[in-house]
Image: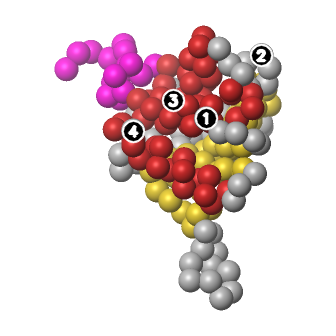
């Protein structure tokens, strides 16, 4: 499998590794932060859960249970993408959440086909309104590659599909 490496947007706001693999229905979000990563991931999960378009799409996955502990810590989040609209909602929430982080926070989005994108809070905070819109669009496209061909309402119908 051949990988292509490239940068999103000027200023290296996001770094992506993409290939031509099949569309994955889930994306995994991992958080690396100065505070305990599990706490930051739980906070991101709350933000995602508050978005109407993402209700029921976010699953929390815990890591292994350390010896002597009652349970494992939140390791990452899995978002089920049923349409390009869900990808756009996830991207919008993720960018908004990152803009409000202080310190060094990185979120890694991974698809099953090996594609991944990394966003850093310090770079997202520096974006103006137009760059933010572009960042959300690029992130949604990375999560749901054919989102540009889907309609803006996120109903899964292609813009060129006959009306129902």
Q: Nearer the viewer, mark 2 or mark 4?
A: 4
Q: Cα distance, mark 2 to mark 4?
A: 29 Å
Magenta-colored stretch includes residue 130: no
At mark 3, the secondary structure is helix
Q: Position of residue 129 (x, y in %)?
A: 59, 13
Q: Is residue 63 above or below residue 25?
A: below
Earlier in the chain: of badge 1 and badge 4, it is 4
Tell which of 52 and 149 is nearer to you: 52
Quadrant containing the N terminus is top right
For mark 4, what is the residue?
51
Residue drawn 41% across the image and 29% down it? 85
Residue 73 x, y percent position in the rendering: 61, 68
Q: Are marks 1 and 4 in contact (CB under 8 Å)?
A: no
Q: Are marks 2 and 4 in contact (CB under 8 Å)?
A: no
Q: Which residue is mark 2?
A: 10
Q: What residue would you read off at disc 3? A: 92
């Amino acid at each position: 499998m051949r990988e292509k490496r490239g940068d999103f947007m000027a200023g290296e706001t996001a770094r992506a590794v993409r290939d031509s693999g099949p569309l994955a229905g889930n994306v995994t979000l991992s958080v690396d932060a100065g505070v305990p990563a599990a706490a930051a991931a739980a906070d991101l999960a709350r933000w995602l859960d508050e978005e109407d378009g993402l209700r029921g799409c976010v699953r929390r996955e815990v890591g292994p249970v350390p010896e002597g502990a009652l349970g494992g810590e939140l390791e990452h989040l899995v978002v089920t993408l049923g349409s390009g609209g869900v990808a756009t909602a996830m991207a919008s929430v993720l960018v908004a959440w990152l803009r409000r982080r202080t310190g060094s926070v990185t979120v890694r989005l991974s698809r099953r086909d090996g594609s991944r994108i990394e966003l850093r809070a310090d770079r997202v905070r520096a974006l103006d309104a137009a760059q933010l819109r572009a960042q959300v669009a690029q992130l949604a496209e990375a999560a749901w590659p054919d989102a540009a061909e889907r309609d803006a309402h996120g109903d899964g119908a292609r813009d060129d599909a006959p009306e129902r």
